């Protein structure tokens, strides 16, 4: 499914979420439904990110099999729509350096857990 289209919905931890039209038609390289599901179920860190335009999303981040960098999955604030998912090189760099300050500065309601 690499580089192909994603389904209309992805179910993770028993919750089905709609996949945005943008993401369905043009997923980032390496992003599959299985990898998105893995991040949503086994996130290591999550929080609310506010973009420059003021829009907000819940962001879930985790390492997934077959990818060297953390994957960030952005979900709508109502938890109904997966907006986008991509390799997050910046988050990976800060995570690997132990720089939790980066996440504290860029995300609200920050939670960290063992991804298991």
Image (tube, grey):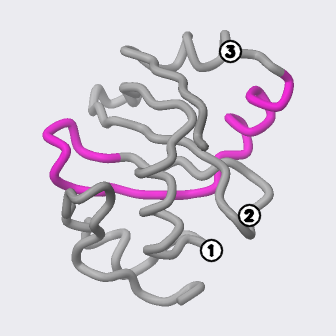
**Residue 55 on image: x %, y %:** 27, 33
**Residue 110 on image: x %, y %:** 45, 18
- Foreground residue, 29 or 79? 79
| Nearer-N-terminus badge (3/1) | 1
The residue labelled by disc 1 is 29
Cα–Cα span, label 2 and label 1: 10 Å
Residue drawn at 76 percent across, 16 percent down: 99
**Residue 14 on image: x %, y %:** 23, 59
The magenta segment: 75-97
Neighbourhood count class around disc 1 (C-alpha, 10 Å): few under 14, some 14–19, many 20 upward = few
Q: Quadrant of residue 66?
A: bottom right
Q: Is residue 91 above or below residue 36?
A: above
Q: Is residue 94 magenta?
A: yes
Cα–Cα span, label 3 and label 1: 27 Å
Q: Secondary structure at mark 2?
A: loop
Residue drawn at 34 percent across, 77 percent down: 24
97 to the left or right of 76: right
**Residue 92 on image: x %, y %:** 74, 39
Neighbourhood count class around disc 2 (C-alpha, 10 Å): few under 14, some 14–19, many 20 upward = few
The residue labelled by disc 2 is 67
Residue 100's tag is 3
Residue drawn at 60 percent across, 32 percent down: 114
Instruction: Name the residue furthest front.
Output: 116
């Amino acid at each position: 499914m690499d580089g192909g289209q994603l389904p209309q919905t992805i179910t993770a931890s028993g919750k089905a979420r709609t996949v945005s039209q943008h993401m369905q038609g043009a997923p980032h390289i390496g992003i599959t439904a299985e990898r998105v599901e893995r991040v949503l179920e086994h996130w290591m860190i999550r929080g609310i990110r506010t973009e420059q335009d003021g829009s907000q999303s819940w962001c879930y981040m985790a390492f997934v099999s077959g990818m060297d960098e953390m994957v960030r999955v952005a979900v709508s604030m109502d938890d109904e729509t997966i907006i986008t998912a991509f390799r997050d090189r910046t988050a990976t760099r800060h995570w690997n350096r132990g720089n939790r300050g980066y996440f504290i500065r860029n995300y609200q309601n920050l939670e960290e857990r063992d991804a298991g």
